[in-house]
Amino acid sequence: MSYSSSRLLLRLFHRRRHPILLSRHLLSSSSSFPPPDTPSTPAFIPSPRGLTRSESQFNSWVSRLSPGFTADDLASAVRAESDPDLALDLFRWASLRPGYRHSASSYHAALSAAIGSRRFSAAESLVDEVLAGACPPDLLLLNTCIRFCSSRKHLFSRAFDLYKKMQNSPSDCAPNLETYSMLLSAILKRLGKPPVSYVYLKAVRSLAKQMKMSGIIPDTYLLNLIIKAYSRCLEMDDALIVFREMPLYNSEPNDLTYGYLIKGLCEKGRTNRATELFQQMREKGFVPTGGVSMVLASSLAMESRFEEAIKVVFDMVENGKKPDVLTYRTLMEGLCREGRADEAFELLEELRKKRGGINQKVYDDLIEGLHWICQSDKGKNKEVCKGDGFDKSDSLD
């Protein structure tokens, strides 16, 4: 090979930055180079690649872990590492060590790192390994797995697989209060309106029964979940039974308890019982939400119990809750249809003047609707009078 061709190849290799190919070429073509006394370009010697920060940190953790490190040592290292990818790499590296087996603490540390950093695919793989028996069962670890599965829609059934694993585990890994709360919360996320909700009602009944059989004393939060599930399915008799059993568990109903019951009873058509619970709730000092008060006020107005509905509306306004337009329409248009239009207009003006009552836009819409209803009712009355052969001009002698 000529000198000029050698220089050309060196420049090409140097520009393309292929140090390995360049060294091979130099070795293979050294015999064709010109004699030493001929001037030539110095050989390109590549510098070795330095370690990245993650590789250096990984090597540092490996060197810190003694050859006979335990699962607790690995769990401490995984928790101490701020980089989640590096922590998971360290966990997988330990799995390949001969004679080493992960414990519940190391799996819990790795799972917490994966969930906290939103590495959901890695967390799902860890849950599958725990479910397959990769480590001894542990209550804290299984509850963490159930919490993660409950938060992911496609892992809903996996949460109940973990629950069954807990039931078949030793007594120290049996489901506890937190387990039942998470499972019931996951079911409530899927509960819609009947008849779809009846699909999950059987699971609610089963969990409540198994909880009682296992001797777990529920708290107010768990009992509220059961009441909410029954109320959404309109199984109000079962919801009221749980409500009456609350003192037996040293649990006191709160505003959420009364709210779930009042809504369910109104949808079921049991307005009398809903009104009793509303009064009991107010006597205890609980302030109902706007949704609860609006449902009750609308239900009372639809049954022509306008005085009670008006009290509920004023109670809302005094507590800083604003009824929606539908609630106002149900109440005031009901008054007009009952021939009490004057009362409806007086109520509208009173609510307009009251602080926190009706704003101008809602007021204009309601005024227009009330006038239209009154005119329609007058037209219907005239038609009825003409049909009966009665005329106001006729004298009644």
Image: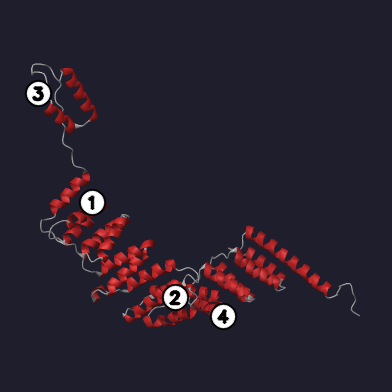
The tag earlier along the polypeptide, 3 or 4, is 3
Name the residue beneath numbered marker 4: 272
Left/right placement of residue 144 relative to residue 57 reads right
The tag earlier along the polypeptide, 1 or 2, is 1
> Which-is-in-front pick, marks 1 and 4?
1
Q: Amino acid at mark 1?
A: Leu
Q: Label 2 to label 4, Cα distance in Å?
A: 19 Å
Q: Amino acid at mark 4?
A: Asn
Q: Label 1 to label 2, Cα distance in Å?
A: 45 Å
Residues tagged 3 and 2 counted as in contact (Cβ below 8 A): no
Q: Nearer the viewer, residue 321 or 231?
A: 231
Circle 2 sits in a helix, a strand or a loop, which is it? helix
Circle 4 sits in a helix, a strand or a loop, which is it? helix
Could you classify mark 2 by the number of other residues whose Cα lies within 10 Å: few (under 14), some (14-19), or many (20 or more)?
many
Vertical relation: 31 (above or below) 100: above
Q: Label 1 to label 3, Cα distance in Å?
A: 48 Å
Q: Label 3 to label 4, Cα distance in Å?
A: 107 Å
> What residue is at 17 percent from the left and 29 percent from the top?
22
Name the residue beneath numbered marker 2: 227
Left/right placement of residue 352 relative to residue 263 reads right
Left/right placement of residue 342 relative to residue 96 reads right
Residues tagged 1 and 3 counted as in contact (Cβ below 8 A): no
- In the rendered image, residue 8, in percent from the top left (x then y), is placed at 21, 21
The tag earlier along the polypeptide, 1 or 4, is 1
> What residue is at 48 percent from the left and 72 percent from the top?
232
